[in-house]
């Protein structure tokens, strides 16, 4: 998981908006031995936008494998799915199918475009499970910051909750069975976000919490949590200058009340990205969590 180690150390939430569809993004390295890689696969439509993903999987597998979807951060307005190609290589090297997926970005597309697009990606993977050797019953999602927020929604929203969009494969389910969240916001209606994040939320949801109360509630993962949702491993640190650490407590309370499996880890003193021994430990914990939830 060396690539994931590198990415966790980066502050992803505040990726420059210019990276939204960065056509100058550095080409990914070649896949490691034993890994098959396909890039720029169109998985659906978001409005008039052709949505793409990159996928990696073991070259030789004698059974259907669990699949992990990787979702980039960037404050819902920046970032590029290509930055997580090294992560999907790592997951494929360890016995998973893995895909890094594109979603539409603010300001060109506001909520609920982002959740509609990642739901569409999950449905595409299920619809093409035979082609890619995926076990449709064992999908997970991992995300960073805004990507973590979307990952948690994938694990907590049911089809009856709506926001499926019209991107394709409507007969497939969009819910995943395990989630790892790195510093993702959990209740967007809280009043303790810093001004810079309040601005992002306003752009993302089309106004203030007072003016857009329904949208803030619908976009908050804790709105949907119940005992039948995907177990969540959430990392939150106590000196995060963008996502207040109380967001982790709110998630822990909601999971506890619902009887949902998983855990919330509070990293004392860490900001929105960290390194060293804690970085290595959390990466190892993420892999172990997925193995426990999706391989056993």
Image: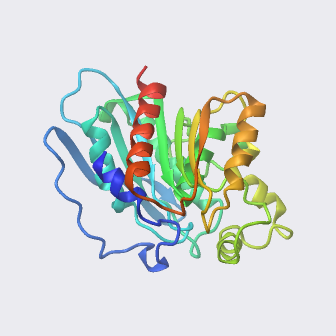
Outermost residue to the right:
210
Q: Nearer the viewer, residue 259 or 235?
A: 235
Residue 206 percent location from the top left of the image? 72, 72
Q: Is residue 250 above or below residue 50?
A: above
Can you say which quadrant of the picture contains the C terminus? top left
Residue 58 percent location from the top left of the image? 23, 35
Q: Is residue 12 left or right of residue 4?
A: right
Q: Nearer the viewer, residue 23 or 275?
A: 275
Q: Is residue 159 above or below residue 208?
A: above
Residue 176 percent location from the top left of the image? 54, 36
Q: Using the rendered image of the protein, determine whether residue 7 is visible from the camera's viewpoint.
A: yes
Outermost residue to the left:
33
Q: Nearer the viewer, residue 204 or 128?
A: 204
Q: Is residue 37 above or below residue 48?
A: above
Q: Using the rendered image of the protein, determine whether residue 166 is visible from the camera's viewpoint.
A: no
Residue 83 percent location from the top left of the image? 35, 62
Q: Residue at x 52, y 66 (%)?
A: 13
């Amino acid at each position: 998981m060396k690539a994931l180690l590198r990415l966790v150390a980066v502050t992803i939430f505040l990726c420059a908006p210019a990276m939204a569809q960065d056509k100058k993004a550095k080409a990914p390295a070649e896949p490691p031995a034993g890994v098959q890689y396909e890039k720029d696969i169109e998985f659906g439509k978001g409005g008039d936008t052709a949505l793409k993903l990159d996928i990696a999987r073991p070259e030789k597998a004698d059974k259907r494998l669990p699949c992990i979807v990787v979702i980039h951060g960037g404050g819902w307005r920046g970032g590029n799915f290509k930055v997580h190609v090294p992560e999907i290589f790592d997951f494929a090297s360890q016995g998973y199918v893995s895909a890094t997926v594109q979603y539409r970005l603010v300001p060109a597309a506001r909520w609920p475009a982002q959740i509609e697009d990642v739901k569409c990606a999950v449905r595409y993977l299920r619809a093409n499970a035979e082609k890619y050797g995926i076990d449709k019953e064992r999908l997970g999602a991992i995300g960073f910051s805004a990507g973590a927020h979307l990952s948690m929604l994938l694990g907590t929203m049911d089809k009856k909750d709506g926001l499926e969009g019209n991107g394709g494969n409507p007969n497939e389910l969009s819910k995943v069975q395990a989630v790892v969240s790195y510093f993702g916001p959990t209740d967007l209606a809280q009043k303790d976000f810093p001004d810079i994040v309040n601005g992002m939320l306003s752009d993302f949801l089309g106004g203030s919490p007072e003016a857009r109360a329904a949208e803030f509630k619908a976009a908050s993962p804790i709105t949907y949590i119940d005992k039948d949702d995907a177990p969540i491993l959430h990392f939150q640190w106590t000196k995060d200058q963008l996502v207040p650490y109380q967001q982790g407590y709110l998630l822990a309370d909601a999971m506890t009340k619902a009887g949902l499996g998983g855990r919330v880890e509070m990293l004392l003193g860490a900001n929105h990205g960290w390194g060293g021994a804690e970085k290595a430990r959390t990466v190892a914990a993420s892999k172990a969590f997925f193995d426990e939830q999706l391989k056993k």
